[in-house]
Amino acid sequence: MLRGIDNESIDLEFRNGEMGVKRGEIDLYAEGGIDMAKTVYTCFCTDNIHEGHLKIIEEAKRLGDVTVGVLCDSEMIRYNRFPILTTSERMEMVKRIPGIAKVVVQNSMLYDEVIHTIHPDYVVHGDNWNTGPLQVIRNNIVSLLNKYGGELVEIPYTINEHVQKIDRQMREKLAMPELRRTRLKKLLKLVPIVKTIEVHSGLTGLIAEKTIVSKGEAIDQFDAMWVSSLCDSTDRGKPDIELVDMTSRFRTINDVMEVTTKPIIFDGDTGGLTEHFVYNVRSLERMGVSAVIIEDKTGLKKNSLFGTEVQQTQDSIENFCNKISAGKKAQLSEDFMIIARIESLILRQGQEDALKRAFAYVGAGADGIMIHSREKSPDEIIRFCDEFRKKDKTTPIVVVPTSFNSITESELSEHGVNIVIYANQLIRAAYPAMENVARSILANHRAKEADDSLMSIKKIITLIDEI
Ligand code: SPV
Ligand code: MG
């Protein structure tokens, strides 16, 4: 018994001394026996078929019967290609290419399952995965094929003006306010935990947008960006006390948006006066921001990581609920989220108070809750999440593990957390690096000694892509 390209069984028979094959209802006999078609597999991770893909298909067809895998949504995201089309739309798009035997969903960027079920004689791929993070996927396929003598056929990656233009247009589409705004809600359905990194400028936006790592056997990248009040203020040399006005904060958002496509979660501090908050909700959704997080403090806000070392006042449940409902009423789009941040653990008001507030805020219309802590241990956060999830299985939970930084994303996800925000690490990394270089130049009266800590001139002048 052999396997067909559809993974169905094939019976080999002899009739009148000739070998034939019976596959399903079809009898194939050929004089002098038959030449069994080879099985060829290629995987597409795209919303758009261009000449590069067609070239791969042509080469694959030359080798045998072609099965195309369409990478599923959640893996497209890890690949840094947020899907604009749904999986079934992408499958339809591929099915329209003439001469393809079968289209399947590839559920993992690694090929183990595919190879196991399809057992292709050939896998065809562009040669763009020979360097960089994609190499891990190439290594995975090579070792799988080697086990049974399958072959990897690589063809030169098509890179020309037309293909580059299509790529750019797809990215620009993702950056448009409507599409960008919807992306956070979509992500919440598609990934186990939305990995969010702080941004406070175009440059940090680029880092959030482009950083990809290959770890173990797969690649990964950030899903969303956090426009932190702490970092936005610090970058301007100002304290984090709602001193940087909204117009300046919006400028930061705009700088980030100009060079990125990923969704933005905005740190709205206390939300200010309810009468002002409603205007800011409209402005944020119009810009394409996906969510605002407001914290239940009132009066002069100080950074939460000061805890009770400074005077901070928590808002009443009633006032804060009114602010949330007013924001929800003002909002015009379906997908914008108002997330309520609970400061009870920061202000030592206890779990009971935190939970009471969480349920009240959800009742007032909050689309998610953020629970914050400045403990080194994640225990109080975990306890809160477990208790909250006993009663509420769906409202997204957001956490900011700055002090309880030993906990991993998968542990947080196991306790019902949906969004993790790395809220200040980029600016905390940049400041000491810059200070050290400044010290070195001052101490040596020249820049030579600092050179080893610096990015090369060639890299910095080519860092930013020209349009
Ligand atoms: C921020 O990043 O500005 C935050 C999170 O609000 S924290 O600094 O931990 O309060
Ligand atoms: Mg803040």
Image (cartoon, rainbow, N blue to C red):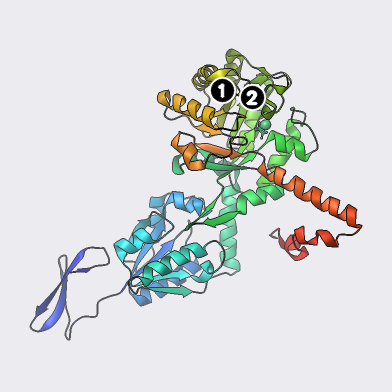
The quadrant in which residue 181 appears is top right
Where is residue 413 shown, x and y percent of the image? 47, 38
Mark seen at residue 36: none
Question: In which quadrant of the rendered image does the N terminus lie?
Answer: bottom left
Answer whether labels 2 and 1 touch (C-beta < 8 Å). yes
Kind of residue sitting beneath label 2: Val
Residue 429 at what x, y percent from top left? 71, 46
Q: Quadrant of the C terminus?
A: bottom right
Give the crowd class for mark 2: few <14, some 14-19, many >=20 residues within 10 Å.
many
Q: Which residue is mark 1?
A: 329
Count every numbered label the image shows and give the total: 2
Closer to the camera in the image, 264 or 27:
264
Residue 265 lies in what quarter of the image? top right
Q: Is residue 168 above or below residue 42?
A: above
Residue 234 horizontal/vertical position (percent): 76, 37
Residue 308 lies, with reference to residue 36, above or below; the image says: above
Q: Secondary structure at mark 1?
A: helix
Left or right: 268 in relation to 121: right
Estimate how packed mark 1 is, as few (under 14), some (14 to 19) or many (20 or more) residues with alpha carbons within 10 Å: few
Q: Residue furthest right?
A: 445
Coordinates of residue 271 in the picture (x, y in percent):
66, 25
Residue 278 disc label: 2
Q: Residue at x 67, y 36 (%)?
A: 228
Q: Amino acid at mark 1?
A: Lys
